[in-house]
Amino acid sequence: MRLRRYLLVILTATLGAWVVLLPAVAGSETSPAIEAVNGTGIYAEQTHRWSPSQATVPAGGAVTISNPTAVEHGVEWVGGPERPSCSAGIPVGTTPLARGANWSGTCTFANAGVYTFYCTVHGPEMTGTVTVSANGSTTISAPAMMGVGAAPSTAAGSGEPAPAGTPNSPGSSGSPLAGSARAAIKLGASQHGVAVHGSLAVSQDGAGGRLELDLLAAPSSLKLSSHAGKVRVGRLVHPSLRAGSVPFTVALDTTAKRALRRRGRLSLTVRIVLTPVHGSALTITRTVLLRA
């Protein structure tokens, strides 16, 4: 009898400890956090991004979005089943007037779906995605970015992507390009006009990824002797790619257009950065001669 009473006391105490512990554990999970990050690219250009660029929460969950910097950013919801409910600390809108420095707040997502947002100041250059799942999971992830601790996924010394079938990460089976870069990228080496035209064949592994195209010119061709490296004279960002052939047109900025009219020709380096949802960024460069 005494042994049975002793065991009952131990069992009661143990169960009581678990009752106290479980709420503490359940309440310890914090919501994902996404913040604005500013930096400098390899050609000394200013860069802006959300870090991480993706988060997943359950229906009814919240994500903390902040801008801890002195550079002004804002949030514009451009895709999703509905607009989430955001606290007053976040400058939300559809114009560059919704912006600010050093702010923080939370957005709550009632229904499942994929929600996409841009920065109101920097547009698709700063694209973030919140996936609201129905299974109760909470995760955060960030595709590797060039210049942010990740090496491009290329074949050694060739500028070509890793061969198809080489996984970039778990859940990814090959290159984001449909075939080799030589076959997948259609880009004329000599073109006319004030824009560069081409197309990109995207594989299923590249679907949903981010495409950035930069046009770079030598400072001497622009009469910019103060610049030490190449100058970016055009840019296009595609925040979410589809599988198949993706055409693109990248226009010259005003300075490059003047140089083209003055010289009649302008040599450009076209930098293509393809960042899949899973895996490392793929960077490829091509040379294009534009004629007036």
Image (cartoon, rainbow, N blue to C red):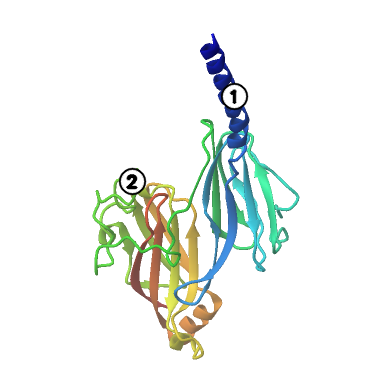
Name the front one of labels 2 and 1: 1
The front one of 106 and 205 is 106
Percent coordinates x, y for residue 144 in the rendering: 42, 58
Q: Is residue 142 left or right of residue 84?
A: left
- Using the image, tell me which numbered label, if any, was put on residue 172: 2
Q: Residue at x 55, y 12 (%)?
A: 2
| N-term mark: 2 or 1 | 1
For residue 7, above or below residue 202: above
Of the pair 105 and 96, the residue shown nearer to us: 105
Q: Nearer the viewer, residue 170 or 97?
A: 170
Structural crowding at the residue carrying mark 1, measured as other residues with C-alpha within 10 Å and reported as few (<14), some (14–19) or many (≥20): few
Left or right of residue 217: residue 136: right
Query: Foreground residue, 89 or 183?
Result: 89
Report the residue that reaches farthest toward the right: 88
At mark 1, the secondary structure is: helix
Evaluate if marks 2 and 1 touch, with contact meaning CB atoms under 8 Å apart.
no
Residue at screen point 51% across, 14% down: 3
Q: Residue most toward the top?
A: 1
Identify the residue position indicated by label 1 in the image. Answer: 13
Q: Which mark is residue 55?
A: none
Task: Look at the image and tell me in which quarter the C terminus lies.
Answer: bottom left
Q: Please give left or right for residue 259 compared with residue 22 in the image.
A: left
Report how far apart the C-alphas of labels 2 and 1 lie in the structure. Answer: 49 Å
Give x and y (percent) for residue 91: 71, 55
Q: Position of residue 167 (x, y in %)?
A: 29, 49
Is 43 situated above or below 129? below
Q: Amino acid at mark 1?
A: Ala
